[in-house]
Amino acid sequence: MKKRRLSVWLLTNAPSPYQMEYLAALAKHMDLDVRLMRHAYANAAWAGGAMPPEAHVMRGWGSERHRDELRLHPSALTEVWRGAHDVYVLSGVYTSPTFLMCAWILYWRRKPWAVWFERPWPEEYRPAWARRASARSGLARMIRKRVLRLILGRATRVFCIGSAAVNAYREWGVPENKLVFLPYVCDLEPFRSCRISEGDHIRFLYVGLLDQRKGVDLLLDAFERLADEYAQVELILAGCGPVKKGCEGRRTARVRFAGHVEREELPALYGSADVFVFPTRYDGWGVVLNEACGAGLPVIVTSAAGATADLVEDGVNGIVINRDDPEGLYQAMKYMVDHPESREAFGKRSLEKSSVVDMAPGVDRFLHAVEDMAG
């Protein structure tokens, strides 16, 4: 008997091009209606450069200068109320009125619905640079946590972006049968055929936002120490962000700022590197680790990245350090310079580990999850 084609409705903020690519792959296997609350990235990843009819940016009530938390999208509420889909998935900013009202309607009407979340921000980590209100106010933190607990308790399933999220929500008391492992995935084939690094240099690569949360300042400090000892080391910083000018003010002959790199050029960039470094102070996931492992690179990363738990094993395909550990970062980079045999072995294991976040298994996991919900 032929399986019926499921109808899935998905609400989210502004998915990255990689997430849009994932959604496009899913749409080949189901009737997927994607509703976006922001215009950012809207046309970034669909074939032909434009979104298909089943995906569109909703018009919101309220000033466009405000974030989604302060705007309401009536069309989303109307579609959820009609209940014409088999399964509903809510992602993005869970404190937005649109998200909360959709969740309430789905629960009240007893529809099968899931939330799709990264792991929550660690409660004990309240750095001064964090922009979210819950990092600055104890009251905001308490309200946010209670709202999240209420949503997790009412949802049919909790789609977890990585095993770190699974473990976090398990500790919050979410039943095991509600937790579903659904990490971010992407097409890694272009990265697997990109190895072009050669010569006597040892090139470290960072890709991502240039801001304090990503630990770029720590990376520059560690590299300056390393460059004083080794003439053959180089560092490439790819990305833009608020601390770019300050980073460029520390430019040395062996640090190259690549700026924004187009997606089609990223595989060659990874292929030119010998070691990937990601000293983030916090990331719910960190899709650049998918790319680095797919490119067969040894990885230096902090335990503060959600993807670390699934993609990097200390001493196997890289080195895992603590957040805000400049000495640990320096020693890890020094180890990579001194042990070329480890770089080669780590890179091979990274390639093996990348299979868990490739596109095909990611599509299969999502299909299985929504089919299980639909019954």
Image: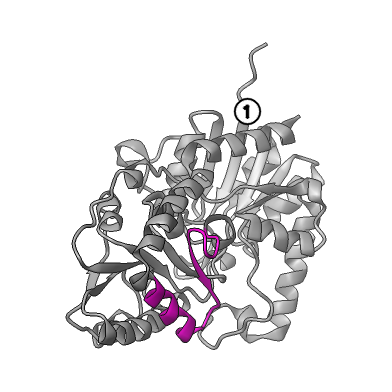
- Residue 149 percent location from the top left of the image: 77, 63
Task: Out of 285 and 138, give the one closest to the viewer.
Answer: 285
Figure quadrant of the C terminus: top right
| 189 up-or-down from 210: above or below | above
Q: Is residue 18 above or below residue 220?
A: above
Q: Nearer the viewer, residue 268 or 160?
A: 268
Query: Along the horizontal axis of the image, is 227 left or right of 14?
Result: left
Mark 1 neighbour density, 10 Å: few (under 14) some (14–19) many (20 or more): some
Is residue 228 found left or right of 140 in the rendered image?
Answer: left
Going by the numbered disc 1, the residue's amino acid type is: Leu
Residue topped by disc 1: 6
- In reply to whether residue 323 is colored magenta, the answer given is yes
**Is residue 75 in sight in this rendering?**
no
Q: Residue at x 38, y 52 (%)?
A: 296
Task: State the SS at label 1.
Answer: loop
Q: Based on the displayed image, in which of its 4 quarters is residue 188 positioned?
A: top left
Give me the residue at 63% from left, 50% from top: 90
Identify the residue shown where x is 44% and y is 35%.
53
Count of marks placed on residues: 1
- What is the image's colouring? one colour
Q: Position of residue 132 (x, y in %)?
A: 57, 77
Say whether residue 172 is visible. yes
Q: Is residue 64 left or right of residue 367?
A: left
Q: Name the spot of residue 16 as percent of width and height, x first.
A: 43, 54
Quarter placement of the N terminus: top right
Chain part drawn in magenta: 312-335
Quarter of the image holding residue 98? bottom right
Q: Estimate the x, y position of residue 191 in percent, counting from the top left.
A: 34, 47
Residue 209 belongs to magenta span: no
Which residue is depicted at the point 38% across and 77% down?
Answer: 334
Q: Is residue 330 above or below residue 274?
A: below
